[in-house]
Image: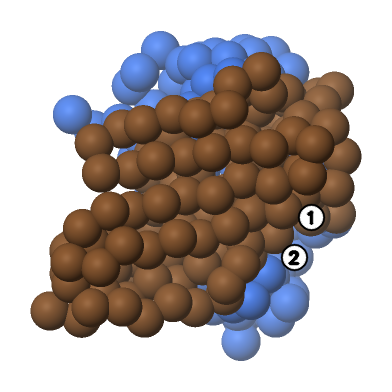
Chain colours: A blue, B brown
Amino acid sequence: NAGVTQTPKFQVLKTGQSMTLQCAQDMNHNSMYWYRQDPGMGLRLIYYSASEGTTDKGEVPNGYNVSRLNKREFSLRLESAAPSQTSVYFCASAGGVGNQPQHFGDGTRLSIL
Amino acid sequence: SQQGEEDPQALSIQEGENATMNCSYKTSINNLQWYRQNSGRGLVHLILIRSNEREKHSGRLRVTLDTSKKSSSLLITASRAADTASYFCATDDGGSYIPTFGRGTSLIVHP
C-alpha cells in the first residue's frame, strides 16, 4: 500500500547547495509529475514525465532538473539552491496523461537559508 | 498560468451542514478533477468529471460541470469534522491533458 513515496520528508539547505529529491511509485504508472506548493499559489507544475524515457517542462522549470530513472522513479534536482525555492514539493503519478487521476506523495518540505 | 480558480477561498460551517465550493476556468477542457488535501499531507483524488458529463456522485460528494459557464461545483452533504481540509480543482487546457491546479478552498467543519 505504499503508493508514491518521497524522500526526504524535510530538508534544510544553504543557498548554493545542491540536492536531489527522490520519488518512487509502485503502481506501475506511466506518467509522473513534480509540483511545488507555496502559500496562496496552489500547486505549480515543475516537470513531468509522460512515460519512461521522456521528460517535459511544466510551468516553473527554471532552477530544476529531472531524471526519469526507470518506470518507478522520478527524481528532482536543485543544482544551486536559492531561497526562492523554499517550498513543499510533491511528486505524483498517474496511469497515463489524460483522464487519469493523480496519486500524490506526502511531500518534501524544503527550506533554503 | 492558472486554469481553475476555486471560490470561496475559505469556508467555515457546522457539522451536519452542506458545503459547496466552486471552480471557474478559462478555456475549454477535456476533464475536471477535484482533490482533497489534509494538513501536512499530499492531495487525494476525489472525482473526475469529463467535459461531456454534467453531474457525478461519489458517496456524500456531488460534482456538477457547466461547460457553457466554464464552471464546476463540489457539494459535500452532511459534512463531518473529518471533512476539514483544502479542496482543489484541476483542469487541463483541452490540448495537453496536463492538469493545472487552482489555489484551493480551505474548508473547516466545526464539531
Q: Position of residue B16 (x, y in %)?
A: 17, 66
Instruction: Please identify the quarter of the rendering in which residue A43 is found.
Output: bottom right
Residue under pointer 1: B2
Q: Chain of mark 1?
A: B
Same chain for mark 1 and mark 2? The answer is no
Examine the rendering and report whether any part of residue A27 can be seen: yes
Between circles 1 and 2, the one closer to the viewer is 1
Q: Label 1: how many residues lie within 10 Å, few (<14), some (14-19) or many (20+)?
A: some
User: Is B53 situated left or right of B98 in this image?
Assistant: left
Mark 1 and mark 2: span between their CA atoms?
Answer: 27 Å
Residue A33 seen in the current view? no
From the viewer's perspective, tell me whether residue B99 is left or right of residue A31: right
Q: Quadrant of residue B85?
A: bottom left
- Give me the residue at 57% from left, 72% from top: B8
Q: Which mark is residue B90?
A: none
What SS does tag 2 mark? loop
Of the pair A53 and A18, the residue shown nearer to us = A53
Residue B42 location, x and y as percent?
Answer: 39, 53
Task: From the image, tell me which residue sits under label 2.
Answer: A80
Q: Residue at x 68, y 37 (%)?
A: B66
Identified by mark 2, the residue type is: Ser
User: Which quadrant of the rendered structure holds the C terminus of chain B?
Assistant: bottom left
